[in-house]
Image (cartoon, helix red, strand yellow):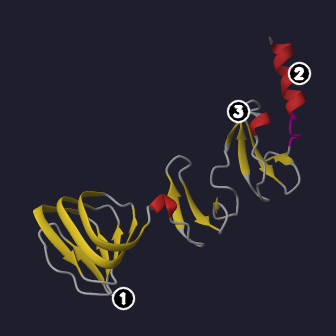
Amino acid sequence: MNINYLQAKELIECSTNKLIEIINTIDLQEKNLKVGSGNILFFNGGEIINGSLEGQGNIMLGNIKISAQIAGSWHTFISDSDLQIKGKISYDKKTEKVGVYNGTTTNDCLGNPINATTIGRTIERPTGIKLGFIYKNTETGKWEIFNGTSWENLDGTEVASADDVETANEEGS
């Protein structure tokens, strides 16, 4: 399948059975853009504005941004957030991690949940994580590692339990 990159100036009739990646803003300038049948329009940072988009038997996917009239028959509209493909790689801006969708959840490269927190208090340690997960405990100031069944301090000292930290905090106040 060929990939066509549509530029804003290219108001052409697209041929059939192509993957068309929309990477720029396409201003139709109140004109009609006809798209041949059997195409996939993949919105990858671009958008279509000001005019009408016409097609028969096409699919739109990606981060769809359209501020234009849509005419004809389109099989499916899929937004990026709705598209769940096993093996899909994504970047989570909040956690600043690359993740891979496994068919159920998105995990980091070690198989840990992408949203597992890496810093916090003892009682906020993440659950459902894998061997080797590293966590910064803000109450003890120590880096901890999950050994598959429990937490250990990276420096080899004994790890504090949530009860130990709570008792130390009460004695300090």
Magenta region: 157-161
Residue at horizontal 54 percent and vertical 70 percent from the top? 88
Mark 1 to mark 2 CA distance (whole Å): 64 Å
Q: Is residue 159 magenta?
A: yes
Crowding at mark 2 (Cα within 10 Å: few <14, some 14-19, many 20+)? few
Under circle 3, the secondary element is: loop
Q: On screen, 20 above or below 171?
A: below
**Label placed on residue 1:** 1
Q: Secondary structure at mark 2?
A: helix
Q: Please report the residue visible at 64 percent of the width from the left and 65 percent of the height from the top.
A: 109
Give the residue pinned by disc 2: 167
**Where's residue 40, x and y in %?**
35, 77
Q: Is residue 29 left or right of residue 35?
A: left
> Which amino acid type corresponds to the residue marked 3 in the rendered image?
Thr
Query: Mark 2–mark 3 contact, CB under 8 Å?
Result: no
Q: Nearer the viewer, residue 153 or 163?
A: 163
- Dominant SS of magenta comes to loop
Whole-Å distance between the Cαs marked 3 and 1?
A: 51 Å
Circle 1 SS class: loop
- For badge 1, the amino acid type reads Met
* Residue tagged 3: 138
